[in-house]
Image: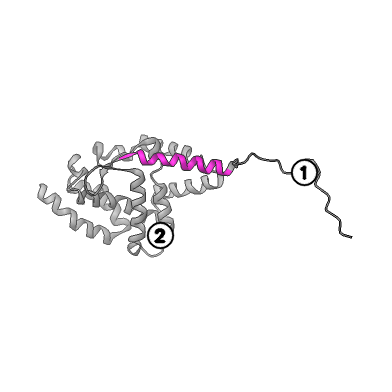
Amino acid sequence: MDTLPHPLPAEKLPAAQPTGTDPRLDAQFAFLNEADRLKSVLRATTLCDGSRRENSGEHSWHLALYAMVLADQAPEGVRIDRVIRMLILHDLVEIDTGDVPIHSAGGQAHASSDTIQAEQRAAGRIFGLLPADQATAFRALWDEFEASETPDAVFAKSLDRVQPVLANLQSGGGTWSSYNVTWDQLTARVGQKIARGAPRIWDWVAAKARPWFDHRG
């Protein structure tokens, strides 16, 4: 005759949790809700039609699309899936630091030790909202992008630099006019990084951009 299994002793039963309570989901949604703030961070660069400044959330989405479309321009061995993940995460620190335009303050503020330290603190706080395993993985991708040493990160950084150039071209100059950017400045601060990871893209972009600077004098 079959017998029913004995119930577990009360002390071994899993603790009941209120409906809708899950520590991992709590952390994941806390991070996702915080990430929504990136949509309110305005960048110096305008939309291509010049109608308004883009926000950093839009910039990150556009860069992910750049990576998908321009994947055939990536050097051999670059993993576009990793590039996309880097680009989605790379500007989340601007929730705390805001956008620091590459052509502002003579280009010094963008790479200053103060800016770098502020971004490191922001990365610790924002990625720290996630469960530990995801916090570690996401922060590692962000650090890899910032260091710009691996093939994936170099290509991702190239796309990050090229997108504002295209926006400025489409909007009639954009931040180049606002910051009185010269061709030499563009080449030094932007062009070299684009060419490092995507030389064919830089050749194409440079041919489009140079006439604007030559005409401006």
What segment carries the magenta color? 24-42
Position of residue 7 relative to residue 109, above or below, is: below
Report the residue marked by disc 1: 12
Q: Is residue 150 visible?
A: no
Mark in the foreground, 1 or 2: 1
Please check the rendered image and state whether residue 35 is part of the magenta-colored stretch, yes or no: yes
Q: Nearer the viewer, residue 185 or 142?
A: 142
Q: Which x, y percent locates residue 214?
A: 11, 51
Return the residue nearer the eye: 66 or 32: 32
Q: Is residue 67 magenta?
A: no
**Label 2 amino acid?**
Ile
Report the quarter where the N terminus lies: bottom right
> Residue at left 40%, top 46%?
90
Secondary structure under tag 2 reads helix
Please tell me how crowded label 2 is: few (under 14), some (14-19), or many (20+) other residues with Cα within 10 Å: some
The one of 9 and 120 positioned closer to us in this rendering? 9
Question: Relative to 208, is 115 on the left or the right?
Answer: right
Q: Amino acid at mark 1?
A: Lys
Residue at which label 2 appears: 80
Q: Position of residue 142 (x, y in %)?
A: 43, 47
Q: Measured from the top left, where is residue 162 in percent x and y? A: 28, 52
